[in-house]
Amino acid sequence: MISLPLILFALFVIIPILEIATFIQVGSVVGLPLTLLGILLTAIIGAILVRQQGFKALNDARENMAQQKSPIEQVVHGVFILIAGLLLLTPGFLTDAIGFLFLIPPLRLSIAYKVWAWIKANGSISVNTSEFSSHYQSSPKQQGGGTVIDGEATEIKDPRKSGDRRIP
């Protein structure tokens, strides 16, 4: 499993070094003015695409909620669009390339399914709201030919909704 310090090292040391090397290579081929123009254009085009796709994801989520459907897929799209926006506004050709890839909807969903499968296999998920609390720990057990996953859920009753008008 990849550790957090390794991820942070990659984000703050390796990626900037690769971006600087890419700037130098591109600049030596096309010159400084075109390199700077390329950086500016990718940021502008990326911002336009992020805005369009972000509003589409938001409108799709609103439509799903109006139809009493879960907007989970639109939330996933929104998270990837946010990450794409951050990458596209960060100066650099490598981060721009990754940001533009995150703007391709089928690719976003493919990555999301793979990440979700990895989390289910290796991680722990907790959900806490004012009315419901649950925790999922990945610890499958084989029992009688099938997989049993232990889980725990606790429902917390809201006294305002149960008819009991006493406020604790």
Image: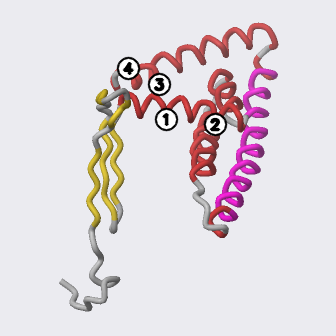
Label 1 or label 4, whichever comes before in sequence order: 4
Disc 3 target residue: 11
Measured as percent of width and height from the top left, residue 163 is found at 30, 89
Give residue 69's quadrant in the image: bottom right
Disc 2 crowd, CA 10 A, few/some/many (<14, 14-19, 20+): some
Tell me whether the residue at label 2 lies in contact with that at label 4, contact meaning CB atoms closer than 8 angstroms: no
Tell me whether the residue at label 1 lies in contact with that at label 3, contact meaning CB atoms closer than 8 angstroms: no
Disc 3 crowd, CA 10 A, few/some/many (<14, 14-19, 20+): few
Q: Secondary structure at mark 1?
A: helix
Disc 1 target residue: 116
The structure residue drawn at horizontal position 53% and vertical position 20%, both measured from the top left corner, is 16
The structure residue drawn at horizontal position 57% and vertical position 14%, both measured from the top left corner, is 18
- Looking at the figure, which quarter contains the C terminus? bottom left
How far is mark 1 from mark 2, CA to CA? Answer: 10 Å
Label 1 or label 2, whichever comes before in sequence order: 2
The structure residue drawn at horizontal position 79% and vertical position 28%, both measured from the top left corner, is 37
Q: Secondary structure at mark 4?
A: loop
Residue extending farthest left:
168
Q: Secondary structure at mark 2?
A: helix
Nearer the observer, 125 or 9: 125
Callout 3 amino acid: Leu
How far is mark 3 from mark 4, CA to CA? Answer: 13 Å
How far is mark 2 from mark 4, CA to CA? Answer: 22 Å
Nearer the observer, 53 or 20: 53
* Prevailing SS of the magenta stretch: helix
What's drawn in magenta, residue-wise?
Answer: 34-63
Disc 2 target residue: 109
Instruction: State yes or no: residue 51 in magenta.
Output: yes
Callout 2 amino acid: Leu
- Looking at the figure, which quarter contains the N terminus? top left
